[in-house]
Image (cartoon, rainbow, N blue to C red):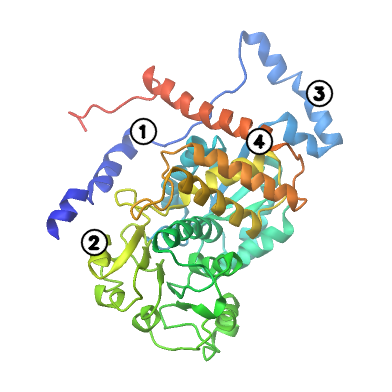
Amino acid sequence: MAGKKENYELEKPLREARKLHPFYRGKIEVALKCPVRSYDDFAIWYTPGVAEVCRAIAADPEESFSQTGRWNTVAVVTDGSRVLGLGDIGPEAALPVMEGKALLFRYLGGVDAWPLCLRSNSTDEFVSMVKALQPGFGGINLEDISQPACFLVLERLQKECEIPVWHDDQQGTALVTVAGLFGALEVVNKSLDTIRVALVGAGASNVRIAHLLMQAGVLGENIVLCDSTGILNRRRNELAETNPWKWELCELTNGENITGGKEEAIAGRDVLIALSTPGPGVILPRWVATMNTDAIVFACANPTPEIWPWEAKEAGARVVATGRSDFPNQVNNSLGFPGLFRGVLTIQSKAITDSMCLAAAGSLYDFARRRGIEEDSVIPSMEEWGVYVEEAVAVAEAATREGLARQPLPSACIREEAEKMIHRAQEMTRLMVDNGHIALPDPETM
């Protein structure tokens, strides 16, 4: 086993991150998108010319979407209370993650995103602060907020905001996980309406995954969730007061009302989706061995999966996925939010719904199916940039069908814009590197 770990160089990304973050001192920056041919242009882009645009927007605030960059700008907002496997580390320590999110928005979706790390003292204050940001943004991406506050924050902001609000740890993880499951089920030749699913971890991600699975066709009675206390069941009355979102799932899932812990939840299941404590050793191989034939195991804790992929395979799993790029079948939110927001922003959707998330998941699956699905390739990779175009089109079409588009457009126009914006972002990065404006570190001095 040690040799396999060495081959994957599990610690290399951590070593490189420690070196390169202080070298670049940030991952994004503001760049101009209009020309400055001479200093006379400042009279157009700034005073006095800009007053004409201000007056137009004052008369009709919707003009801010067509006369400024608002239409393509997303705020990536966190309070740093639950940062990817690190916990409550505070807003300053969350900033590198939010910058990374903004980088992915830009490079993969052609979306301008800006990290905003807020220090708030209550849920009400956080909600008020995010609502106050609306005039400058076309959408809000919530990130790394502890539960149960994250559920309440999302619900309130979706009801009270005039622009789309999405929580990537809930909706993004659910979207990509369901897309990966579609592909895995094709490999093992099983169907959504017959599979038995165990969800280990009942945080923001798995709570939303459970709902999206049911909307996709998995029977609620065939799903069980397990939190740190045990399996969610109708005897867990304490949750009715402390966490109504979990209590709702106590009533919607676990048709047999079984009790116990992770071992009991996993036994006899076709699918295991773990989004819990970073491993390894959180999921034991002997538990995987009790699953049904041709089992599917998604061990997606960051930065280390709950069980090593080779351990799950040796225990009998046929399809194994993780959240890491250095293993096959990476189930990662980066396949979701860039393309989804590309479509949302292009048609200026007023909201992001579960139907739009399912449309995005379906587009990921369709893309993978067209290029071929195998045990170690059930979902597209980030390198297949065309998938973000397909996702943008599918999401925009779904939003338009639901009557949420401020600016409905033909599918061909959405596709053309998505291709142009994504290609532009990636080509700009390449040119900056080629011309030395993005410096490459000297390997001898790093």
Mark 3–mark 1 Cα distance, whole angstroms, equals: 39 Å
Q: Residues within 10 Å of mark 4 (few under 14, many from 20)?
A: many
Which residue is the site of mark 4?
414
User: Separation of disc 4 and disc 2 at Cα?
Assistant: 41 Å
Q: Nearer the viewer, mark 3 or mark 2?
A: 2
Residue tagged by mark 1?
24
Instruction: Identify residue type, mark 1.
Output: Tyr
Label 2 and label 1: CA atoms lie apart by 36 Å
Circle number at residue 52: 3
Q: Earlier in the sequence, mark 4 or mark 1?
A: 1
Q: Is residue 246 visible?
A: no
Between marks 3 and 2, how big is the CA–CA gap?
63 Å
The image quarter in which residue 37 lies: top right
Name the amino acid type tagged 2: Trp
Query: Are the residues flagged by discs 2 and 1 in contact, CB closer than 8 Å?
Result: no
Residue topped by disc 2: 310
As drawn, the residue found furthest toward the left would be: 3
Q: Residue furthest front?
A: 189
